[in-house]
Image (cartoon, rainbow, N blue to C red):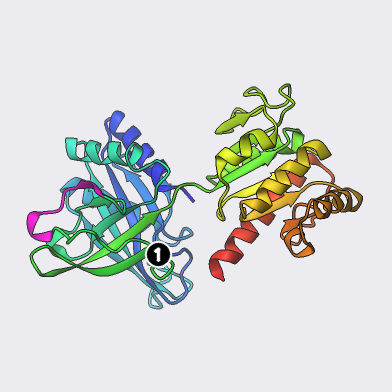
């Protein structure tokens, strides 16, 4: 899946190449559908695409419809469903139905202002939301905002929402259609997409496994931090994809990172002096995932030391040890894959709980 930021960067690049663009957003679905509501796909006037709104079922039709949207400069909502009458007509073979909002992003100052806002003011450490009206009166208009303020809006005056607008919470889906009150007392149906900052993967130990783990994590849009006091290992040459490299002891840098429940901590140094402080700080900060590399003997040694330091067996049960899904491999690349698989499994299980 392409992130919203990647799609915006891509469309901005198309503009630089002299191409217009459109953004397709999956705003409604019913029945069995390939992808969840909120998925996006960017299309250029030269038939370039990035992202998807299904798994190949309707992308060709969206590409065609987007060309019409770009040519006319007018947004549209396309409906796709299962068609029993013609096997050659584009539709969802799984039997579901979806609606896709296609918004033009022509080479205009307004589009560039929107792109710049997303890539600067709306790409930091705070969550932000994108509002796209689905009513005809304001179709194709947009607003970006955080809980504190509006970052961008091209909504007409008579479609301006009453602020603050309900933001994402545990009781509200991150991607949803909602009827919101307007400043003039009326209401407007909108599709709201809330984008959270990237989850962080903190890797303690800069060995061979960490190199591949960093590459896989970046492919999955994690913010990757590599920590290892052995400075000959923790280098930009070995970790060109890492967002942050800290050649320091975990106890000297982990506290400042303030690990949270959405963060993952992979302790893979295989050195007790490095492992133990990292594990303790992960437990203290309630990191969402904590994994420890090593054999059953290594695991028991680390756990004995942690128990002596005051941690209970219930605390230690939070640590995935040995780290990674059981795929029967001893190769560094495959171990890295198993670790990332377990992190995603844990993340998804908490999301669906």
Query: Which of the two residues, 244 or 215, is positioned nearer the viewer here?
Result: 244
Could you tell whether 260 is left or right of 149 in the image? right
Q: For the point 21% across and 36% down, which residue is it?
A: 107
Q: For the point 23% across and 59% down, which residue is it?
A: 164
Image location of residue 96, percent across then percent down:
42, 74
Q: Is residue 223 something one can see in this rendering? A: no
Query: Which of the two residues, 45 or 29, is positioned nearer the viewer here?
Result: 29
Q: For the point 76% across and 33% down, which residue is it?
A: 207
Q: Which residue is mark 1?
A: 169
What segment is highlighted magenta in the picture?
Answer: 149-159
Residue 67's place in the image compared with 186, above or below, is above
Q: Is residue 256 something one can see in this rendering? A: yes
Residue 161's place in the image compared with 238, above or below, is below
Could you tell whether 158 is left or right of 254 in the image? left
The secondary structure type at the circle numbered 1 is loop
Query: Quadrant location of the C terminus?
Result: bottom right
């Amino acid at each position: 899946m392409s992130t919203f930021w990647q799609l915006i960067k891509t469309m901005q690049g198309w503009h630089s190449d002299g191409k217009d663009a459109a953004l397709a957003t999956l705003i409604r679905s019913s029945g069995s559908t390939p992808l969840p509501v909120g998925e996006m796909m960017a299309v250029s006037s030269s038939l370039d695409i990035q992202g998807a709104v299904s798994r190949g079922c309707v992308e060709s039709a969206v590409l065609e419809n987007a060309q019409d949207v770009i040519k006319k400069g007018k947004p549209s909502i396309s409906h796709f469903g299962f068609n029993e009458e013609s096997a050659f007509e584009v539709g969802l073979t799984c039997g579901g139905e979806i609606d896709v909002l296609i918004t033009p992003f022509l080479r205009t100052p307004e589009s560039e202002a929107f792109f710049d806002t997303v890539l600067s003011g709306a790409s930091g450490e705070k969550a932000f939301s994108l509002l796209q009206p689905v009513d005809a009166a304001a179709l194709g208009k947009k607003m970006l905002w955080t809980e504190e303020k509006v970052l961008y809006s091209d909504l007409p005056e008579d479609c301006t929402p009453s602020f603050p607008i309900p933001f994402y919470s545990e009781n509200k889906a991150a991607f949803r259609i909602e009827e919101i009150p307007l400043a003039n007392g009326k209401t407007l149906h909108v599709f709201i997409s809330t984008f959270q900052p990237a989850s962080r993967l903190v890797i303690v130990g800069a060995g061979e496994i960490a190199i591949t783990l960093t590459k896989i994590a970046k492919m999955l849009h994690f913010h990757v931090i590599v920590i290892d006091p052995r400075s000959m290992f923790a280098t930009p040459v070995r970790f060109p994809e890492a967002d942050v490299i800290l050649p320091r002891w975990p106890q000297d840098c982990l506290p400042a990172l303030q690990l949270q429940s959405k963060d993952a901590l992979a302790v893979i140094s295989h050195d007790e002096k490095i492992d133990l402080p990292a594990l303790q700080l992960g437990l203290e900060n309630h990191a969402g995932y904590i994994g420890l590399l090593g054999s059953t003997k290594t695991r028991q040694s680390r756990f004995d030391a942690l128990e002596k330091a005051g941690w209970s067996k219930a605390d230690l049960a939070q640590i995935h040890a040995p780290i990674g899904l059981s795929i029967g491999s001893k190769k560094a690349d495959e171990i890295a894959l198993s670790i990332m698989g377990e992190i995603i499994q844990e993340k998804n299980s908490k999301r669906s709980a």
